[in-house]
Amino acid sequence: MLTPLFEAVRPIPAIALVPVAILLFPADEQGIVFITFAAAFFPIMVSTRHAVRALPTLWEDAVRTLGGGRRHVLWHVVLPGILPGVFGGLSVGMGVSWICVISAEMISGELGVGYRTWMSYTIVDYPAVIVGMLTIGLLGWLTSAAVELAGRRVTRWLPRAEEAS
Amino acid sequence: MTLGITLESLSLGYARGPVLNGIDLTIRPGEVLVIVGASGSGKSTLLRALAGLLPAHGGRALAGDEEITGASRERAMVFQDDGLLPWRTVRRNVELPLRLRGLPRGERKAVAREWLARVGLEGHEDRLPRELSGGMRQRVQLARALAGAPRAVLMDEPFGALDAQTRAGMQALLLDVLRDTRATVVFVTHDVDEALLLADRVVVLGHGGIRTIVDVPGPRDPAADRTALRAQILEEL
């Protein structure tokens, strides 16, 4: 039911929401949270939707013929079965939201590594700009690694490339 | 208690067209009925209808006295393709029908352990399905289906993808297990020799209906000479 609305909103770059975020949240950092949420939401939603559609019906049939109802199919098949897709979306969403949070801090923030990097640029403190960029890279890598690690832990059942070789 | 299944003028099909028309058949409680037929003859379609996974286009199917309108734990199914849930260990897969019935954990574990021992998989309880061979996965499927104490077991070419040696071992295991459970079994295969080994009766499907039904006299012996019955079935295929 919400698909047309989502499909209309999805192509809008999250960073283009900065003016809206400033209007909605003029006084604090909530606007940046809003932009980050908008950036992460759509990759995760699309990836989850594809994961649900790609689930083999065989697993559902198996649970139903063992006595399971719709609730059991949701709990025992759909939720665990979509985790690889959900974590794929989380991985993309984390990358996009990281770009957006830094950009939003640079444009409208008063806190954060993006804000500090931009302020260093405006006062021509290039060593601090380099430190800011390296910090952004390191934090981005750590957050991606955290999602990757969590994803691997909950999808241990997937065949891994090293096992197939 | 085993389950009798009755088909009354049952017609089945998909959106692209009918597959089976006006099937009348009585499956006796406790018998092993094997369905054979060429590819596309409707073997799996019929089995899915018996499982309650496919609605009838016409007529009806009865399990006991009740019309089949949906899936039920009384009619467990063993699939040709791997129907195990890949994120659950072997033991947790076998426990699944008991979990769906709300049995306590201790009881679930005991029943699962018993069935895994019965199919020769002790020591593999904590392995994931992807770590097992095709034959072992089919044994887990069999254990899972029977752990829920169904009154009928529906098997869709369960040994079709196995090599000859593993297949012979699985057939022997199935015969051994069936002796104890006495569940009604409907078994789909395209292998006539397998059908004659396992069946009390063989139903040959073709041209949208039942071509013939062949009674197979016991005992179930792999060495028994069933040349005449084999020829009779092959003639109808």
Image (cartoon, grey):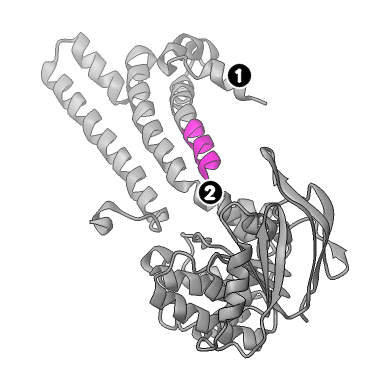
Residue B161 rendering spot, x and y as whole percentages = 44, 64
Q: Which residue is under mark 2?
A: A56
Left or right: where B232 falls relative to A18 = right
Q: Is residue B48 magenta?
A: no
Left or right: where B123 falls relative to B225 = left
Q: Residue at x 33, y 18 (%)?
A: A103
- Per the rendering, the mark at residue A5 is 1
Q: Is residue A48 magenta?
A: yes
Mark 2 and mark 1 residues within 8 Å of each other at the beta carbon? no
> Mark 1: which secondary structure?
helix
Q: Which amino acid type corresponds to the residue marked 2 in the rendered image?
A: Pro
Main SS, magenta residues? helix
**Image quadrant where residue B149 sits:** bottom right
**Image quadrant where residue B211 sits:** bottom right
Quadrant placement of the C terminus of chain B: bottom right
The residue lying toward the viewer, choosing from A14 and B64, is B64
Figure check: B116 above or below A51: below
Residue A128 rendering spot, x and y as whole percentages = 15, 22
Residue B189 rendering spot, x and y as whole percentages = 57, 66
Q: Chain of mark 1?
A: A
Say whether disc 2 or disc 1 marks the residue closer to the N-terminus: 1
Quadrant placement of the N terminus of chain B: bottom right
Which residue extends farthest left? A127
How crowded pointer 1 is (Cα within 10 Å; few <14, some 14-19, many 20+) is rated as: few
Q: Which amino acid type corresponds to the residue marked 1 in the rendered image?
A: Leu
Residue B236 rendering spot, x and y as whole percentages = 64, 64
The residue segment tinted magenta is A44-55
Figure check: B85 above or below A26: below
Which residue extends farthest right? B65
